[in-house]
Amino acid sequence: MSEQTYSSMRTAMVESQLRTSDVDDQRVIAVMARVPREDYVPAERRAMTYIDRPIPLSGGRALNAPLVTGRLLKEAQVDAGDKVLLIGAATGYSTALLAEMGAQVTAVEEEGGPEIAVPGVTLVRGALAAGAPDGAPYDILFIDGAVEEVPAALVQQLADGARVVTGIIDRGVTRLCAGRMVGGALGLSSLADIEMVALPGFGAAKTFTF
């Protein structure tokens, strides 16, 4: 496909997926209209770049649909200079958007995970649930996918007042959630049921039943 074709598809994505679905932060609209998402999609799947569904990647991972990315960015309330801990960098699309918005991004991806190359971003390879404590404290925790629970190891890397956006898996349903760190405790609110890709390594502690 030509650059012009991708540009037209990107415009259509903004108008039909974002503006119609509560993504009303003009900074988010502008950055998603500007950054070429196709640069962060494997070549063999680029025809799927702007569909409103997750895009499969290698190793059982997937790239969230554009609407999910837009909602996460909106709820994160990113300001220039914010220190962001991004969990689940995947191919680097959300990482690139955050960096374009002026954030200082530390992106965590698994060993052997998808390749990413975003200028000005610190990439940490390792367990997603472990985060990147060397760069703490962070102003924003951006979990780019759905988890059963936000582990204490990540919560402990946040500054007081930090914003948190994530998906939470609740009895098989994925929900967009957002909240803040207040007095060392994280409070999350459920905002919407939305299809989000599940991230590995975040299983909730199992309890015994009789």
Image (cartoon, helix red, strand yellow):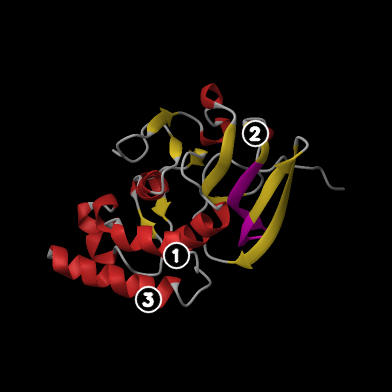
Q: Is most of the magenta stretch helix, strand or loop?
A: strand
Regarding mark 2 in the picture, which secondary structure is present there?
strand
Magenta stretch in the rendered image: 162-177
Does label 2 or label 3 sit earlier along the sequence?
Answer: 3
Q: Residue at x 35, y 45 (%)?
A: 92
Q: Position of residue 184 (x, y in %)?
A: 75, 35
Q: Amino acid at mark 2?
A: Ala
| Residue annotated with mark 2 | 159
Residue receiving disc 1: 26
For disc 3, the marked residue is 15
Q: Which mark is residue 88?
A: none
Is any part of residue 109 visible from this angle? no
Which quadrant would residue 95 be assigned to in this image? top left
SS under mark 1: helix
Q: Kindly identify the residue that appears in the image at 32 percent across and 66 percent down.
A: 50
The quadrant the N terminus occupies is: bottom left
Q: Is residue 140 left or right of residue 103?
A: right
Q: Residues within 10 Å of mark 3 (few under 14, many from 20)?
A: some
Query: Does the magenta run of residues contain 137?
Result: no
Instruction: Classify 109 as above or below 166.
Output: above
The location of residue 193, given as percent across then percent down, is 61, 67
* Residue 174 counted in the magenta span: yes
